[in-house]
Image: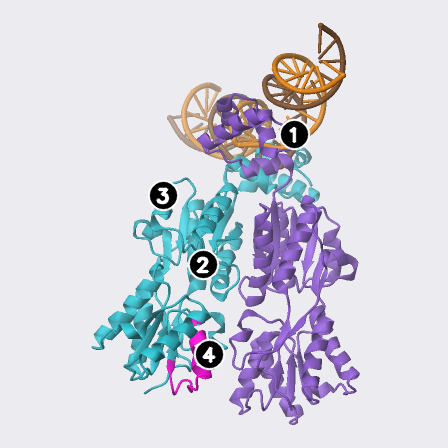
Chain colours: A cyan, B purple, C brown, D orange
DNA sequence: GATTTTATGGCCACTATTTACGAAGTTTCA
DNA sequence: TGAAACTTCGTAAATAGTGGCCATAAAATC
């Protein structure tokens, strides 16, 4: 591989000039620029990104930590982040935290040791305090899909409360009044906000919140199954169910069908997130759209803006959910 | 950030000794090792991976190119690769090719410019010849889910022919004889092999291959819909359908249901790949398991073995598919 | 007490690039 | 015409390590 030395020799200029031509930040006369460019083309020169990083103290890489690499939610998110950063010539180093505190911290340490210029984190197990401490270090961090008050302009998150509200409101407006809610784990702020939205909708329509119609799930299919089983036992008048994510909605649908319910006539179900296969389910799932792809884009823009000083990027920290009507919700 | 100089000063030893402690290749007495270790801990020293890379000409990073970051198939694959490499302290740089030749080449160039020690590629649009040329360059490449004869020990692939065979055989053994086949795009080797397996199964059971019962799909839901529409028009006696992937099977299920078929009584459908939401569909999808997670693991091992000389890794280049029986296939 | 082995220091070349500083050269304008 | 101002470019230091070689000192063995 050709080095900058060979280019400078062939072009008859100094190393510094070659560097200037590459980095376009200082002025070089058109004549010498062309000489250098020709020499580069002739040698097939490609700058050594490692040496660039060492000299400039910039690695041009952004570390991403997600809970899992598989799963529809993270796929969309990474897709959004990567496409934006790739276009800016930055690269993405991805690792996983598996929603466990120790592994999340370990993953962050790993990324820091790789000299990332910034980190974009989707962490669930680690505390807000940890994140606040981390944010004081020299590597900037940005937080996806989680709202931390002290770091609010480094967070890209969904208005989860509004999502929970919209879900339940959608059911109420179809005439339902016995509405179950299968939430996510309560240690997650997202879960709490979605539940809060549910309660607000009930209140707005003068429906009482009934403990027996609430179940704390696990955001997985199993949580939907266990949840619906419990809720039906608690109240056999149930006509509608809001789930705090689509996986649990899918589990609930499966359980309902296996227990003789016609969907959506016998039971209306609404999900949350609008993951890619929500439309593959039968009946296709009415759900709350979580614009995670756009949020990934935005996190990348935020990083580009604050770390690489890219101009003219409008940042939106909080995204609003919308209702996606399909066929899993019917009228009473 | 502390440098190796500060560590050597604090510990009262030379640079060489600090290096020796870190790299564990030459002997250091327990006493000095401890002194150095303490100094490192005290300073919070973390070797600068960029400088290490420059000096050692190793970036300790593996470039991964996949078609998409979202989608169940790639999620599983990346998961497999990442977990293995992460455990070995290597990091993964991921980018996308979107199944388009230009973007795939662009992605490969991008990864090469980042000085990856090796590339693991899932490419679909690029030609075998291109890959053979690429393999002659200094950066080793490994190929996922694609078989290239000249590079066979750098490929980790599925026995697709066997998968196609098993799918059709499963249907035949349930008594079906009018069996449609919705294949993938014929420019992809995988698609051709799966089709070939289908033909072998037909032949083995003395069933003719009928052009009218074959449709070239696009590996997406739309292909399943268009495919089933065409096949039904060609032959209204159709009782079973094999699809070359699960997305198309899902599309076909949707079309069938919307056109009054009971599943699986009216039409049996078998998929291919066993993607994560195959079990969320209704009825749950009988399919051919494609062990893509394990294949990802294996690709990572192959890279570790050939690039970093990790010992005692058994490499398996070709994986065998298995039948996963669920509820979308019925008996005649 | 001599010889061998082990541990460590010191030094330097090497990696490919960025960037501060300053030296030329060119233009502008009184 | 000469000084000031600006443009353009080269020199050399800095970046943070690796790794090889040789010298030397300390410990172990004979």
Helix, strand or loop at label 1? It is: loop
Residue occupying the point 48% across, 29% down: B38
Q: Which residue is mark 2?
A: A297
Q: Cβ–Cβ below 8 Å for labels 4 and 3? A: no
Marks 1 and 2 in Cβ contact (< 8 Å): no
> Which residue position holds label 4?
A254
Chain under numbered label 2? A
Distance between mark 4 and mark 1 Cα atoms: 60 Å
Please indicate, yes or no, whether residue A271 appears anywhere in the rendered image: yes
Tag 4's secondary structure? Answer: helix
Q: Mark 1 highlights which residue?
A: B26
Q: Which residue range is magenta in the image?
A: A247-268
Q: Answer above or below: position of B270 versus B74.
A: below
Mark 1 and mark 2: span between their CA atoms? 47 Å
Rendered image: mark on residue A133? 3
Give neighbour class at mark 3: few <14, some 14-19, many 20+ (Cα, 10 Å).
few
């Amino acid at each position: 591989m050709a080095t900058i030395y060979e280019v400078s020799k062939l072009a008859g200029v100094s190393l510094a000039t070659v560097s200037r031509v590459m980095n376009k930040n200082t002025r070089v006369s058109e004549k010498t620029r062309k000489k250098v460019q020709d020499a580069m083309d002739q040698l097939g020169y490609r700058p050594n990104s490692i040496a660039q990083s060492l000299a400039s103290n910039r690695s041009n890489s952004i570390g991403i930590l997600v809970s899992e690499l598989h799963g529809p939610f993270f796929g969309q998110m990474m897709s959004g982040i990567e496409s934006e950063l790739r276009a800016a010539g930055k690269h993405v180093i991805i690792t996983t935290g598996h929603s466990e505190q120790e592994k999340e911290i370990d993953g962050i340490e790993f990324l820091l040791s790789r000299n990332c210029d910034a980190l974009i984190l989707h962490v669930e197990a680690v505390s807000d305090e940890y994140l606040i401490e981390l944010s004081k270090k020299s590597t900037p961090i940005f937080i996806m899909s989680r709202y931390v008050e002290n770091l609010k302009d480094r967070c890209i998150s969904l208005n989860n409360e509004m999502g929970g509200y919209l879900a339940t409101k959608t059911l109420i407006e179809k005439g339902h009044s016995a509405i179950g809610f299968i939430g996510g784990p309560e240690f997650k702020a997202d879960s709490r906000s979605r539940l809060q939205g549910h309660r607000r909708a009930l209140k707005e329509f003068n429906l009482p919140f009934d403990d027996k119609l609430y179940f704390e799930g696990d955001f997985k299919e199993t949580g939907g199954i266990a949840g619906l089983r419990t809720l039906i036992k608690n109240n056999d008048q149930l006509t509608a169910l809001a789930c705090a994510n689509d996986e649990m909605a899918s589990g609930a649908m499966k359980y309902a069908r296996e227990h003789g319910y016609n969907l959506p006539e016998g039971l209306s179900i609404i999900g949350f997130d609008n993951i890619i296969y929500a439309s593959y389910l039968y009946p296709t799932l009415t759900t709350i759209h979580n614009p995670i792809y756009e949020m990934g884009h935005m996190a990348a823009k935020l990083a580009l803006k604050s770390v690489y000083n890219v101009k003219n990027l409008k940042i939106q920290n909080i995204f609003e959910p919308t209702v996606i009507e399909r066929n899993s919700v019917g009228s009473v």
